[in-house]
Image (cartoon, grey):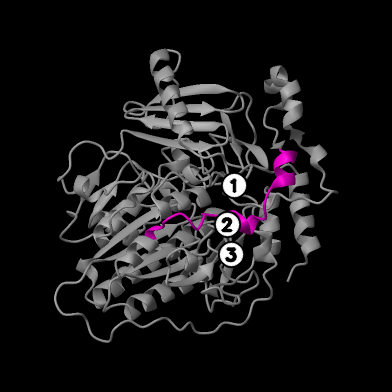
């Protein structure tokens, strides 16, 4: 177990190198690292449902499968597949159901996106604007290596020449921030699991949580009857020296080195002490999902299967890596092998549904929490879209999104109008027969009537995203990006320019003004952030980390 000093020292060393290129780089909680030793593997005793099926009709089950940092191009149904590798099992959810060609993440990074999905609301409605990080830094932390906000105020005119691409450190936010574990979805929020549980569904969480670890915020407190996974933002997939693993380390990324040195390989069941899985993490979670389906075959259930793949650290099973000799780049080959394991897992889940006779009575949803990350150094993950995770360009939030429900969703369907992660809340609630809460705004809608042709119009005329002073609105065909540093408004016509290549703001001042007014009105309905951002970090739009900067290149500043 790493000591507290080593954790902070590792953090400081990474910060000192100035690598704050993503708000999720330091998303892992110190409380998670310091959670005690990891016990050996042991079996999990899942709650067993009835031995025989109920008489008559039963409610449909709902399975939500979420990948982590999976890009639009990483699925062969929506792109070419990572390294050209096919994903037949994930593809089948779409080909046997519906593909949402304009499916959006609730945010461009994992934790706020998951918060929106779980609650059916813009996460900014309850202050969940930034990924939970520990911003309480020791007195010896070298903040002088970063440009503080006060200095920016004095040098605004020279920002473009003097301070371009420099991370901005907020000392005030660091000084007053609560512990990372207390940053999460408040207990007062109603989750999709609570909705399902209220209608008699057995609810199970597997894998990543990342929505708080304080009392009232954990999955067991937020509507899940059972939870097996990790509360912090990630885990290793196998021990680094396991003979069955292939590791890919990004030498250009000091934070990657920090994760390798500190990230655990563990899970916990219903809040009990951590223990080690007995195999590669993706396959372990799949094994448990299959067991959960068997245990609940005779009662309605909601399963949230949150894989941490293909998020860093990049670790693949040697057998998956060896199966892809056509990919010559070792990093891309490792990444593609990780996605191969997710696809295999999806196939096993779908096969178990069929084996248990539940195939036709289960709504299966597949998506990714946000777009592919620039910090893995791979340029193709979000093609054809520009941008990355932690940007509000389409590459950061236009994600694979599909649903399958035989008899209810026509096979081979495509739905073109924009939907968002928060629509899963309302859709699953409708399937369960749970009325939506009336004491708060619910931003999501049930998309099934639109997919089935029973509802006309668009589920959402307008969608919003926000992180600090970087704000974006999509209204119909128009998308306005209100950048923070440097302050600039970019307007894109997604009908003719879906990959955001051509800024048409200068030619459409009235549209820009109208969309800025919509952003202002939306902001007025949101809460102030429940905790402040530690840094604002530059991210180049058209190249991944580990590549050479280009003069005049497009970039955004991301707050976290």
150 or 366: which is nearer to us? 150
Magenta span of residues: 170-192
Residue at left offset 80%, top offset 41%: 143
x, y percent for residue 511:
38, 18
Q: Which residue is denoted by mark 3 in the rendering? A: 235
The label nearer to you, 3 versus 2, is 3
Whether label 3 touches label 2, CB < 8 Å: no
Q: What whole-number distance in Å separates the C-alpha atoms at marks 3 and 2?
A: 9 Å
Callout 2 crowding tier (Cα within 10 Å): few <14, some 14–19, many ≥20: many
Residue at left offset 44%, top offset 18%: 505
Mark 1 or mark 2: name the one nearer the start of the chain.
Answer: 2
Specify the farthest residue to the front. 439
x, y percent for residue 455:
17, 42
Q: Could you say which disc has been placed on residue 102 in the image?
A: none
Q: Which residue is denoted by mark 1 in the rendering? A: 375
Instruction: Name the element at disc 3.
Output: loop
Mark 3 or mark 1: name the one nearer the start of the chain.
Answer: 3
Q: From the image, which quarter does the N terminus lie in?
A: bottom right
């Amino acid at each position: 177990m790493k000591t507290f000093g080593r954790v902070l020292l590792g953090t400081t060393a990474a910060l000192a190198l100035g690598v704050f290129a993503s708000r999720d780089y330091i998303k892992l909680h110190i409380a998670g690292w310091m959670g005690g030793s990891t016990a050996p593997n042991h079996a999990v005793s899942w709650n067993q449902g009835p031995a025989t099926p109920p008489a008559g009709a039963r409610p449909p089950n709902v399975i939500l499968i979420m990948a982590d940092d999976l890009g639009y191009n990483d699925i062969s149904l929506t792109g070419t597949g990572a390294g050209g590798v096919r994903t037949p099992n994930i593809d089948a959810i779409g080909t046997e159901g519906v593909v949402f060609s304009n499916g959006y993440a609730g945010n461009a990074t994992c934790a706020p996106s998951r918060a929106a999905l779980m609650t059916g609301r813009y996460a900014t409605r309850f202050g969940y604007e930034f990924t939970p990080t520990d911003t309480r830094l020791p007195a010896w932390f070298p903040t002088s290596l970063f440009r503080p906000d006060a200095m920016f105020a004095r040098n605004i005119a020279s920002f473009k020449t003097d301070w371009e691409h420099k991370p901005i450190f907020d000392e005030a936010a660091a000084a007053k921030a609560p512990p990372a574990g207390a940053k999460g979805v408040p207990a007062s929020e109603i989750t999709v699991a609570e909705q399902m549980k209220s209608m008699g569904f057995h609810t199970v969480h597997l894998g990543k949580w990342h929505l708080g670890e304080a009392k009232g915020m954990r999955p067991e407190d937020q509507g899940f009857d059972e939870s097996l996974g990790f509360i912090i933002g990630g885990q290793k997939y196998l021990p680094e020296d396991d003979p069955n693993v292939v590791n890919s380390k990004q030498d250009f990324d000091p934070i990657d080195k920090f994760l390798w040195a500190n990230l655990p390989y563990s899970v916990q069941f219903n809040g009990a002490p951590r223990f080690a899985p007995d195999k590669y993490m993706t396959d372990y979670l799949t094994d448990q999902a299959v067991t959960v389906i068997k245990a609940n075959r005779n009662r309605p259930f909601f399963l949230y299967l949150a894989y941490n793949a293909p998020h860093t650290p990049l670790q693949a099973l040697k057998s998956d890596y060896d199966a892809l000799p056509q990919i010559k780049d070792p990093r891309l080959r490792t990444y593609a092998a990780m996605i191969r394991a997710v696809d295999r897992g999806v196939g096993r889940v779908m096969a178990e549904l069929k084996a248990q006779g539940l195939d036709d009575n289960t709504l299966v949803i597949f998506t990714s929490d946000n777009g592919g990350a620039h910090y893995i150094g791979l340029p193709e993950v979000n093609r054809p879209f520009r941008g990355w995770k932690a940007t509000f360009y389409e590459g950061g939030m236009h994600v694979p999104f599909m649903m399958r429900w035989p008899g209810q969703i026509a096979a081979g369907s495509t739905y073109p109008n924009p939907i968002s992660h928060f629509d899963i809340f309302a859709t699953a609630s409708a399937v369960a027969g749970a009325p939506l809460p009336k004491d708060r705004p619910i931003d999501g809608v049930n998309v099934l009537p639109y997919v089935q042709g029973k509802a006309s119009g668009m589920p959402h005329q307008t969608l919003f995203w926000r992180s600090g002073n970087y704000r974006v609105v999509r209204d119909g065909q128009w998308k306005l990006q209100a950048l923070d540093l440097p302050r600039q408004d970019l307007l894109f016509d997604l009908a003719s320019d879906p990959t955001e290549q051509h800024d048409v703001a200068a030619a459409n001042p009235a549209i820009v003004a109208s969309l800025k007014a919509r952003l202002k009105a939306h902001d007025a309905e949101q809460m102030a952030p429940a905790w402040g951002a530690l840094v604002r970090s530059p991210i180049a739009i058209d190249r991944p980390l580990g590549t050479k900067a280009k003069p005049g290149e497009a970039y955004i500043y991301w707050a976290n």
